[in-house]
């Protein structure tokens, strides 16, 4: 789904106060995210994401009831427009500063203290999208690289399922990065709720450990994160397994963009090569 297609769906949905062509594109990935007036609208890539959109809206309602600082839905149910799920959200005030790792840590402490929700949350299917992302990549990537990632997935999936957690399992965000925290005038707010799951809390913490090791997060910022949360997941013997699973998923996620974006292909090839070589010092770049 490119921007033009997403705008066509947005226009057909008729959920914005003005023309779809005037909406500001905020992001384009599995969802195209547009803002106009007091609303934000997410257009999903295809109908397979409809159930996830329903769950995200239900999670937003649950978090609102629990008083968790998180993005609020403007409509309780998704629309299905020309095969694309469409959800409508209240637009947050402009950010007053970038989110820092410790902001994320404080929100995770709140989420990780929540009881089981009334919403049926799935396990964190970290590797569940690998096949779809590789299929979307098609002939743009080397078939040997695709098979390598499938083999990694098949190895890490049972290993992750067999882990003994240090923390009590429960609700998690599922994609716990500072980019999913918005710092408004009233403080940090959690956004992008579509990967909320019921699983090992360690999933939310390994993300930042990987950011330190692969994406260039300064050590002092990682230390601020662990201090604010109160524990460093790297002390847990299962950390390398969850890290390996997330690296596998991150490679496959980039692959889906390779057909239309040479930079995505180059980043995919860099990541796969570093995994094949076992070189944990190779820097990955956010995409």
Image (tube, helix red, strand yellow):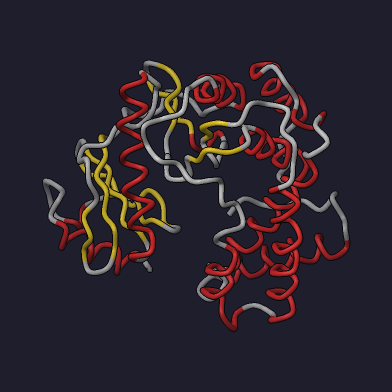
Q: Is residue 114 left or right of residue 23?
A: right
Tell me the quarter of the picture where residue 264 sits.
Answer: bottom right
Tell me the quarter of the picture where residue 238 sits.
Answer: top right
| Residue at 69% across, 81% down | 143
Q: Position of residue 121 (x, y in %)?
A: 45, 41
| Residue at 30% across, 31% down | 61
Q: Position of residue 75 (x, y in %)?
A: 20, 41
Q: Is residue 119 left or right of residue 256?
A: left
Q: Position of residue 242 (x, y in %)?
A: 72, 45
Judge by depth and name the residue closer to the eye, 4 or 158. Answer: 158
**Image mark count:** 0
Q: Quadrant of the C terminus?
A: bottom right
Tell me if residue 246 comes above or below residue 225 in the rendering. Answer: below
Judge by depth and name the residue closer to the eye, 201 or 259. Answer: 201
Judge by depth and name the residue closer to the eye, 7 or 272. Answer: 272
Tell me if residue 145 comes above or below residue 277 in the rendering. Answer: below
| Residue at 27% across, 43% down | 40
Q: Position of residue 73 (x, y in %)?
A: 27, 36
Tell me the quarter of the picture where residue 68 sits.
Answer: top left
| Residue at 54% across, 41% down | 174
Tell me if residue 263 comes above or below residue 38 in the rendering. Answer: below
Tell me if residue 193 comes above or below residue 9 in the rendering. Answer: above
Q: Quadrant of the N terminus?
A: bottom left
Q: Is residue 212 left or right of residue 139?
A: right
Judge by depth and name the residue closer to the eye, 263 or 207. Answer: 207
């Amino acid at each position: 789904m490119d921007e033009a297609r997403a705008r066509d769906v947005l226009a057909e949905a008729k959920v914005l106060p003005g023309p779809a062509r005037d909406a500001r594109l905020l992001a384009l990935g599995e969802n195209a995210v547009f803002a106009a007036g007091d609303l934000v609208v997410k257009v999903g890539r295809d109908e397979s994401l409809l159930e996830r959109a329903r769950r995200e809206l239900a999670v937003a309602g649950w978090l609102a009831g629990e008083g968790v600082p998180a993005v609020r839905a403007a409509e309780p149910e998704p629309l299905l427009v020309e095969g694309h799920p469409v959800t409508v959200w209240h637009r947050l005030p402009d950010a007053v500063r970038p989110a820092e790792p410790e902001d994320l840590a404080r929100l995770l402490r709140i989420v990780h203290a929540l009881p089981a929700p009334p919403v049926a949350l799935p396990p964190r299917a970290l590797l569940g999208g690998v096949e779809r992302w590789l299929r979307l990549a098609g002939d743009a990537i080397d078939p040997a690289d695709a098979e390598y990632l499938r083999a990694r997935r098949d190895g890490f999936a049972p290993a992750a399922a067999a882990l003994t957690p240090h923390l009590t399992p429960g609700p998690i965000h599922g994609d716990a990065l500072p980019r999913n925290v918005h710092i408004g005038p009233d403080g940090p707010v959690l956004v992008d709720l579509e990967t909320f799951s019921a699983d090992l809390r360690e999933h939310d913490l390994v993300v930042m450990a990987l950011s330190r090791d692969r994406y260039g997060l300064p050590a002092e910022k990682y230390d601020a994160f662990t201090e604010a949360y109160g524990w460093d997941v790297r002390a847990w013997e299962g950390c390398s397994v969850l890290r390996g699973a997330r690296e596998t998923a991150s490679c496959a996620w980039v692959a889906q963009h390779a057909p239309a974006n040479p930079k995505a292909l180059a980043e995919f090839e860099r990541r796969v090569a570093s995994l094949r070589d076992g070189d944990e010092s190779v820097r990955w770049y956010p995409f």
